[in-house]
Image (tube, rainbow, N blue to C red):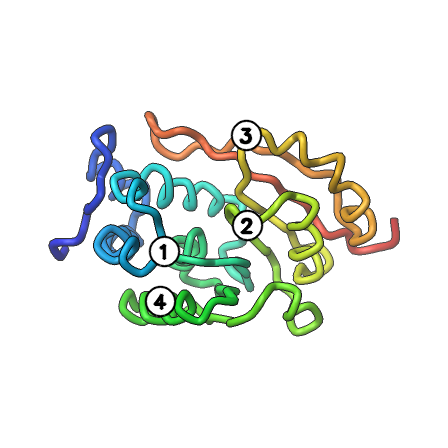
Amino acid sequence: MDAETGAGLGSQLDESALAAYFGDAYPQVAAYAGRLESEGELRGLIGPREVPRIWDRHILNSAAVVPFLPERGLIADIGSGAGLPGIVIAALRPESTVYLVEPMERRCAWLTEIAEDLGLTNVEVKRGRAEEFHGAFECDAVTSRAVASLDKLVRLSMPLVRPGGEMIVLKGRNVAQEVDPARKAIRKLKGSEPEIIDAPTLPGVESTTVVRIVRQTGSR
């Protein structure tokens, strides 16, 4: 492993535990964490206070959604930004195709560069807003992290989900308060009742909240 591997480890995190958790993807994920640590602030991808917390607050937080995603299929990460969770997903789901949907040119340049440097051949960067791709493709799963309220996320994401596919998003602990305001959009777009899931990763790391909504296949 290169000098960047294991960069930004929090004091409570053991590199061997991280390597075991990420398995074969660990070298790619660790190199990505190192690049975020060395370039993220400079390139406007993360704030300065986030650098020491890259693993627990960002990498592991992103990885928490992966168990709920298909091992094979088409996955889209909307508002991908620095590639959280999309780059982490691509490393852990090598047999899936991962679309990174991002409107900002400089962030798209970063995503393209990091995917190439890490050898993530299953990544495609799609420059534009999520709504610009409505009707262009449908995915087995659409995810996002820190993008918008659940109501807005449903409107952005569900049209990109194939019937029978799922919208699986990373949200804050208070997401239950966002469910009622989102119900009209969920019904309109044939979504199921939202399932709020506690998604742990490693011991000592705060668990993540995941919301899953299935796009129904028939009339409701």
Disc tally is 4
Question: Three-letter amino acid code at disc 3?
Answer: Arg
| Tag 4–tag 1 contact (CB < 8 Å) | yes
Question: Three-letter amino acid code at disc 1?
Answer: Leu
Residue receiving disc 3: 173
Query: What separation in Å lies between label 2 and label 1 (alpha carbons)?
Result: 14 Å
Mark earlier in primary sequence (3, 2): 2
Mark earlier in primary sequence (4, 1): 1
Image coordinates for residue 80, horizontal then vertical, percent:
47, 58
Mark earlier in primary sequence (3, 4): 4
Query: What separation in Å lies between label 4 and label 2 (alpha carbons)?
Result: 18 Å
Secondary element at image label 2:
loop
Q: Which quadrant of the structure image shows residue 27?
A: bottom left
Query: What separation in Å lies between label 3 and label 4 (alpha carbons)?
Result: 30 Å
Near-viewer residue (200 or 180): 180
* Tag nearer the camera, 3 or 1: 1
Seen in the picture, residue 97 relative to 151 is either above or below; the reply is below
Query: What separation in Å lies between label 3 and label 1 (alpha carbons)?
Result: 23 Å
- Which residue is at 77% across, 51% downward? 216
Mark earlier in primary sequence (4, 2): 4
- Which residue is at 29% across, 53% downward? 41
Question: Three-letter amino acid code at disc 2?
Answer: Val
Residue receiving disc 1: 45
Secondary element at image label 4:
helix
Query: What separation in Å lies between label 4 and label 1 (alpha carbons)?
Result: 9 Å
